Amino acid sequence: MTDLAAAEPTLPPAALPVVIVDDHSIFRSGLRAELDAGIAVLGEAATVDEAIALVTQLQPRVVLLDVHLPRGRGGGGAEVIREAAPLAPATLFLALSVSDAADDVVRVIRAGARGYITKSSSGAEVSEAARRVADGDAVFSPKLAGFVLDAFGAVSGETAETTDELDRLSAREQEVMRLIARGYTYKEVASTLFISAKTVETHVSAVLRKLQLSSRHELTAWALERKLL
């Protein structure tokens, strides 16, 4: 059952308020225990109806949302997003699933999820993903990038058109831009390109400035629209 009694929980200073939505109590308990100290769990829900009511009531910054909820309303996790988002406009949704199937990824992204990671992720990884979503980033496991492209209607193998905007970026900045847009962390980009995380941060700042964008979420959308991934 949902934790609706916690209507006005007291948050630790600077903690990120989240709600966990999953129909398995063992998973909810395990995830709650594994999240780091910077994450404050306001409550839990197990069904679509419970989740909509809880998110509407508590207005968390991020919802950690199971994709495969019981489909009493016919929509599972995606239905939670469609119903709750208009009632909690400041709330963002990070999808969690045991599946990396294209249909699951595409469905929840189209519903409005800002990220999608698998349940094999560690508590630290989920905590970091939640913070990145709260900061406005789009967060996806790197191997899911192709499904994200499908969700936005990009055609695999299509040659990207050269644009004046892209020409503003150096070759290295373009490499960093593509990896960041695919959901890689600074550390992962640094490891892939054999540069320091600080250098990655510098390149990202330059890319956002040159493209007149304000976040990695906007960068992902920009790259997807131009079929650059």
Image (spheres, helix red, strand yellow):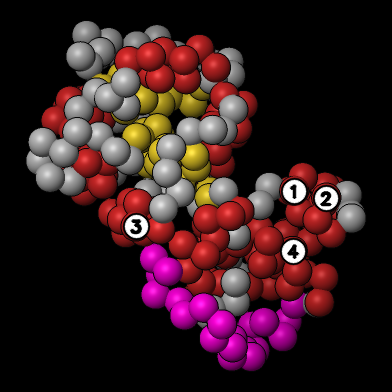
The amino acid at mark 2 is Ser
Label 1: element kind: helix
Q: Nearer the viewer, mark 1 or mark 4?
A: 1
**Mark 1 vs mark 2, CA separation in Å:** 5 Å
| Count of numbered tags | 4
The numbered mark, 4 or 3, whose residue comes first in the sequence reads 3
Whether residue 121 appears in this view of the structure is: yes
Q: Given the current orientation, which residue lies at the most extreme left position?
A: 73
To which residue does mark 3 refer?
A: 103
Is 132 drawn above or below residue 5 in the view shown?
below
To which residue does mark 1 refer?
A: 188
Q: Are marks 4 and 2 in contact (CB under 8 Å)?
A: no
Q: Which residues are magenta?
A: 150-169
The amino acid at mark 1 is Glu
The amino acid at mark 3 is Asp
Q: Percent position (x, y) of residue 145? A: 54, 60
To which residue does mark 2 refer?
A: 191
Whether residue 91 appears in this view of the structure is: no
Is 149 drawn above or below residue 121 in the view shown?
below
To which residue does mark 4 refer?
A: 176
